[in-house]
Image: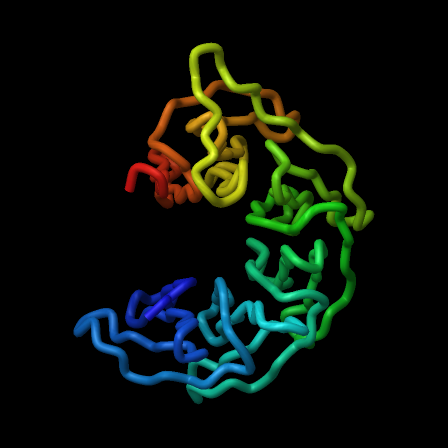
């Protein structure tokens, strides 16, 4: 009940679900679709992410004071709880697999954790709550910039990973003439992703009921597409030819 986040093992053999009702990480056999184990967590969870090798699952603990629980997928046990300021809503693993990023809505802070040592290495505070993120890579695969959606900001912040600073904010297009401002729950802009070739950032707008595309690295608006009511998540196919947008208001 009240499953929040999901991650898949790289080989597709298992799925992991954060279970808010039981405060567990539930392991599901991908072939039988049965829960094989429930691992107790340190508090109520939100979203989760998985390491590139599939050996670690990182669970956002939203319950105060906030943390990231580390689950070993071989022993199927919680092996560590990493404190993080504010209740943690989202966790991400950077594309190079070197860092785990924890975002807090209440704490208005992003915490960067070293994946090897499983210790926080730096953090960045914002004036608004931290929502979904997406990552731009350098030529060598390392993280160049993080795009961060913020509570009630119609757009996203741009964070330079090397300098550890916010460098700018991009505002999404205004509400088009004839459209009614969508007040259907959730955040005004929630859900984003970078294409596999690293050339495009796609961003949803709940307010405009649209999906927008920006070119990388210059962040110029390429265009948009009308979608359903209250789009709040976007997922790209591995070849990035198709974007799937989840629309909360129109189901």
Q: In the image, is residue 90 above or below residue 128?
A: below
Residue 245 at x, y percent in the picture: 36, 38
Residue 72 at x, y percent in the picture: 49, 82
Q: Is residue 223 left or right of 38 when viewed as pictured? A: right
Q: Residue at x 30, y 65 (%)?
A: 12
Name the foreground residue: 154 vs 118: 154
Q: Residue at x 53, y 70 (%)?
A: 58
Q: In the image, is residue 223 above or below residue 112?
A: above
Going by the picture, which residue comes out furthest to the top? 177
Q: Residue at x 49, y 65 (%)?
A: 46
Q: Residue at x 72, y 67 (%)?
A: 85
Quarter of the figure with the N terminus? bottom left
Residue 136 at x, y percent in the picture: 61, 42
- Count of residue discs: 0
Residue 41 at x, y percent in the picture: 50, 82
Which of the colour schemes (rainbow, by chain, secondary structure, one colour) is used? rainbow
Quarter of the figure with the C terminus? top left
Q: Is residue 115 left or right of 2 when viewed as pictured? A: right
Q: Quadrant of residue 63?
A: bottom right
Q: In the image, is residue 6 above or below residue 26?
A: above
Q: Is residue 87 left or right of 248 when viewed as pictured? A: right
């Amino acid at each position: 009940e009240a499953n929040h986040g999901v991650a898949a093992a790289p080989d597709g053999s298992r799925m992991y679900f954060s279970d808010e009702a039981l405060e567990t990480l539930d392991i599901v056999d991908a072939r039988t679709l049965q829960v094989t184990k429930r691992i107790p967590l340190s508090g109520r969870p939100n979203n989760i992410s998985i390491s590139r090798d599939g050996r670690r699952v990182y669970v956002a603990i939203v319950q105060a004071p906030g943390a990231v629980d580390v689950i070993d997928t071989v022993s199927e046990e919680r092996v560590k709880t990493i404190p993080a300021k504010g209740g943690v809503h989202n966790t991400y693993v950077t594309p190079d697999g070197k860092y785990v990023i924890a975002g807090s809505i209440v704490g208005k802070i992003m915490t960067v954790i070293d994946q090897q040592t499983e210790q926080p290495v730096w953090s960045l505070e914002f004036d608004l709550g931290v929502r979904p993120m997406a990552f731009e890579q350098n030529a060598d695969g390392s993280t160049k910039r993080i795009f961060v959606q913020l509570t009630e900001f119609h757009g996203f912040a741009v964070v330079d990973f090397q300098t550890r600073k916010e460098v700018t904010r991009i505002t999404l297009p205004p509400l088009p003439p004839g459209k009614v401002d969508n007040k259907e729950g959730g955040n005004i802009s929630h859900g984003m992703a970078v294409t596999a070739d690293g050339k495009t950032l796609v961003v949803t707008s709940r307010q405009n009921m649209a999906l927008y595309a920006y070119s990388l690295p210059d962040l110029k608006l390429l265009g948009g597409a009308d979608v359903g009511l209250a789009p709040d998540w976007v997922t790209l196919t591995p070849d990035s030819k198709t974007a799937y947008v989840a629309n909360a208001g129109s189901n």
